[in-house]
Amino acid sequence: MAVIKENTLIKTKTVGKKIFVYLLLIPISIFMVLPYFWILITSLKTVAEVFHSPIIIFSRNMGLFNFRDAIDKGVLIRLWNTFFISFTATILRLFFCALAGYGFAKFRFPGRNILFSVLIASMIVPFAVVLVPLYIMMVNFHWIDTFLPLIIPGAASAFGIFFMRQYIRTIPDELLDAARIDGCSEFGIFTRVIIPVITPGLISLGLIFFMQVWNDFLLPLVILKTPENQTLPVMIASLFGVPGKTNMYTLQMAIAVISITPLIIIFLIFQRRFTAGITAGAVKG
Amino acid sequence: MTTSTRLLTRMKESWGEVKKKKWAYTFISPFYILFAIFSVYPIIFSIYLSFTKWKGFGPKVFVGLANYERLLGDYIFWQSIRNGVIIFFLYVPIMTLLALVLAVILNAKFFRFFQIFRTMLFVPYVTTMIAVGYVFKMMMNTKYGLFNMVLTSIGLPAVPWLDNIWWARVSLSILIIWAWLGYNMVIMLAGLQTIPKDLVEAATIDGASPVQAFFRITVPLMRPIILFSVILSTIGSFGLFNEIYALTTVGYTMGGPMYATITPLVYIYQQAFQNFNFSYASAVSYVYFAIIFVLTLLQLKYLGREE
């Protein structure tokens, strides 16, 4: 008797738990998905249907015309710009981060601790402090309206070096010594021994870098002046109507679809690598 | 082994060390070179700039502490600092608690679809913020927006999402929670996986309710992770920019209504790139840096200390 009673008690407990969990998760899920749904729906609407009373969700007029309009307004060149900047910046950053991570993980040299502390401390400096003087510097370099300010200054990230150092530390020294005895140069060890071993880590870090640069807004906004040089986020913002003009929400949302979709696809493919990269810094740090 | 050969091997070894060190310095140098050119030099230049009056062209006139004096009495600057604090309190407690609760649920793995749910929550992290800002602006339109349509259709009053000082801050917080809940949840989940499961189980067997187990065992053990997440959120709420650029810009004025959602970063941007007052913007960025530096230290001291 007692046993049965206890079992039913546990059962009602888990049922109660389940109800609580679903009551929490279902509204949150709707809230999370809603903006994506609304971006997609709006990108297929006509301007007149955006702010309409009663609200229009689906209509007969829906079509891909906003995407055609976006292509006419040069969305493809901006897509290429965004991709080019993100890709170049990512590759360069990964190279410098892995190299410095190797230097810190596997060598002992005078000043290592101080240099490493400087590296960590540099992460505290907020971007806001650098923004204004960096912009003036870019003006003096004649780098305004080029992609260089978006690629070069961030080419070695402190977070990335820290990440790679933690990763490379786990590689046994014997592996490196064996290569050294075989007459491999230190740089040769880096390219032939280290790089192949740390590829999973490089993918994790590379995904974070790529995503960050792709979605970056403030720096491209102040640097890229000519419309043809802009990135997708800047293009979306530039379409926001000036006072007195109707806002092109539909066109904005079509470009938003073009900007968001590639990253979501990459994310869905590499989800595990992505979260591994995010959590490594937080839990170990 | 004779002394001379030992000496010779040691010399050889140390020569190898020097050669290795040369490599090490070469490997780490790119970061320090870039850091010196693109961070240290600009920061020093910016100190100099903050003591001058300069609008982007012509000679720089030395004005001493005039920019800092102006800043002390600058209502909008202090409003931006206040907003950072207000917005922090509006979203951080809710988001952190929700992230932790969701992480505990997903960690228990007793319900289906948790993989899909985790993905759903985390996708905003890779999503172009500026685009999401505009879609929220659309959905939060007072007259024709989706949110008010839903509210009025179930008999609730319409909400002035972006037209009222406090509602605009709440709306901004909703957008931030949407964007960062999943990120924080994933960090908490990783932290939870380092906690031995038996601890919570043992407590439940001893008669503790799930709520008690959560606050007595999970929360204290997760303290470092929670601290990490809260510090990131503090820096984040003063440095909000994209969200405000998209969501609360009215006409050419960012951070409305009535400066209710302006943040220090937005104010620096306005001063530098809309008013071309580079020297004043530099002064603002210094005081801003000092304030968040002190805030972070205080948080580390008070939230980070052991019980």
Image (tube, coloured by chain):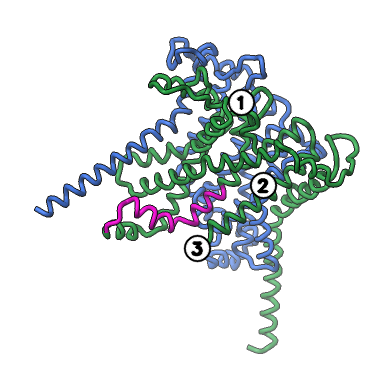
Amino acid type of the residue tagged 3 in the rendering: Glu
Between the C-alphas of marks 3 and 2, the distance is 28 Å
Q: Quadrant of the rendered structure where residue B157 is?
A: top left
Amino acid type of the residue tagged 2 in the rendering: Pro
Q: Which residue is mark 2?
A: A126
Between the C-alphas of marks 3 and 1, the distance is 47 Å
Q: Secondary structure at mark 1?
A: helix
Q: Quadrant of the C terminus of chain A?
A: bottom right
Q: Secondary structure at mark 3?
A: loop
Disc number for residue A236: 1
Between the C-alphas of marks 1 and 2, the distance is 26 Å
What colour is chain B? green
Question: In the image, is residue B214 part of the stretch drawn in magenta?
Answer: yes
User: Which chain is represented by blue in the image?
Assistant: A
- Res. B5 visible in picture: yes
The foreground one among A91 and B292 is B292
Q: Is residue A161 left or right of residue B229?
A: right
